[in-house]
Image (cartoon, rainbow, N blue to C red):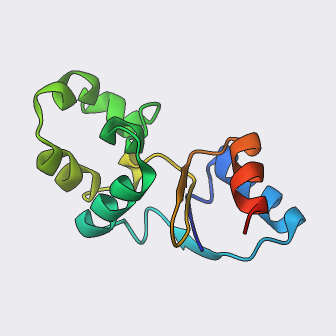
């Protein structure tokens, strides 16, 4: 299982602490230093079953400064994947990537349900 996170992010810190306290093994990946590729993002999106917009960090400074709320409406999925692959700060975090699932953002109840099955 891969845990994609930005170490300075408080939500990521809470998620990491939660994983560690539960003794859930993971491989940590710094989302800014090792930005997800377009291919990874496409695979994760397919696995997630959520709208593509959910992969965007809509509360991030970069998202807001690029005025993406307006721009995404007219962008194709391919263009959105390409954009997400340019900078890890555009990607919603933290992410848990399992063999057959993905968790986007840290929602403790959702993580508890999904990860207690594993």
Residue 91 vertical placement versus 26 (above, below) = above
Residue 81 vertical placement versus 27 (above, below) = above
Q: Position of residue 42 (x, y in %)?
A: 28, 59
Say whether residue 56 is left or right of residue 98.
Answer: left
Closest to the observer, 54 or 60 = 54
Say whether residue 9 is left or right of residue 63.
Answer: right
Rendered-image quadrant of the C terminus: bottom right
Closest to the observer, 78 or 61 = 78
Residue 67 vertical placement versus 60 (above, below) = above
Q: Where is residue 103 in the image (x, y as percent from the top left)?
A: 56, 52
Say whether residue 71 is left or right of residue 59.
Answer: left
| x 43%, y 69%: residue | 33
Q: Quarter-wise, where is residue 68 in the image?
A: top left
Closest to the observer, 9 or 18 = 18
Q: How many marks?
A: 0
State whether residue 14 appears in this view.
no
Q: Quarter-wise, where is residue 60 in the image?
A: top left
| x 87%, y 64%: residue | 22
Q: Where is residue 76 in the image (x, y as percent from the top left)?
A: 11, 40
| x 39%, y 60%: residue | 44
Rendered-image quadrant of the N terminus: bottom right
| x 35%, y 53%: residue | 45
Q: Residue furthest right?
A: 21
Say whether residue 39 is left or right of residue 89.
Answer: left
Q: Quarter-wise, where is residue 32 in the image?
A: bottom left
Q: Where is residue 82 in the image (x, y as percent from the top left)?
A: 18, 55
């Amino acid at each position: 299982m891969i845990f994609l996170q930005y170490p300075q992010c408080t939500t990521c810190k809470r998620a990491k602490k939660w994983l560690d306290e539960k003794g859930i093994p993971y491989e940590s990946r710094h989302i800014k230093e090792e930005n997800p590729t377009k291919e990874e993002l496409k695979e994760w999106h397919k696995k997630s079953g959520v709208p593509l917009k959910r992969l965007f960090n809509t509360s991030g400074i970069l998202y807001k400064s690029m005025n993406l709320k307006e721009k995404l409406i007219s962008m194709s999925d391919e263009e959105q994947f390409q954009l997400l692959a340019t900078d890890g700060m555009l990607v919603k975090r933290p992410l848990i990537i399992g063999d057959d699932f993905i968790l986007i953002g840290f929602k403790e109840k959702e993580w508890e349900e999904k990860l207690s099955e594993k």
